[in-house]
Image (cartoon, grey):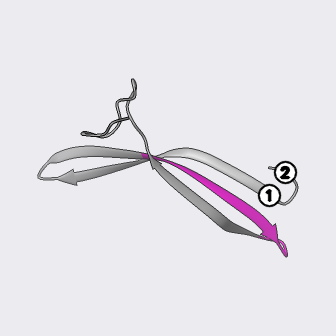
Amino acid sequence: MYANTAIASYTMMISVVSNSAVSHRTHNESRVLVRQDGVWRVVHVHKSPAWEAPFSGPVGSRL
């Protein structure tokens, strides 16, 4: 937090159950919040895939 601005960065994990199997997906998120008139408001959101280490990128990519 800095004055009336806050930045949150985290990894979101989503668990999905289908046909008795559980799968997990993750992505990294960052959010910027600004306090205006005493109320916190989200002013920016960014989401990126969370790759497993070592980083190999998506299938078929040239990364």
Task: Give the residue at the far bottom of this rendering.
Answer: 37
Q: What residue type is labelled 1?
A: Thr
**Nearer the observer, 30 or 22:** 30
Residue 7 lies left or right of residue 23; in this view the side is right
- Dot 1: few (<14), some (14–19), or many (≥20) neighbours within 10 Å? some
Residue 42 lies left or right of residue 40; in this view the side is left
**Nearer the observer, 55 or 29:** 55
- The residue wearing badge 2 is 2
Residue 49 lies left or right of residue 41; in this view the side is left
- The residue wearing badge 1 is 5
- At mark 1, the secondary structure is strand
Where residue 2 appears, as percent x and y from the top left, is 84, 51
Residue 11 lies left or right of residue 60; in this view the side is right
Q: What residue type is labelled 2?
A: Tyr
Q: Which residue is drawn at 75% across and 54% down?
A: 6
Real-space Cα separation, disc 2 to disc 1, in angstroms: 5 Å
Residue 54: image tag: none
In what quadrant of the picture does the C terminus appear? top left
**Nearer the observer, 45 or 11:** 45
Q: Is residue 19 above or below residue 36?
A: above
Region rendered in magenta: 27-39
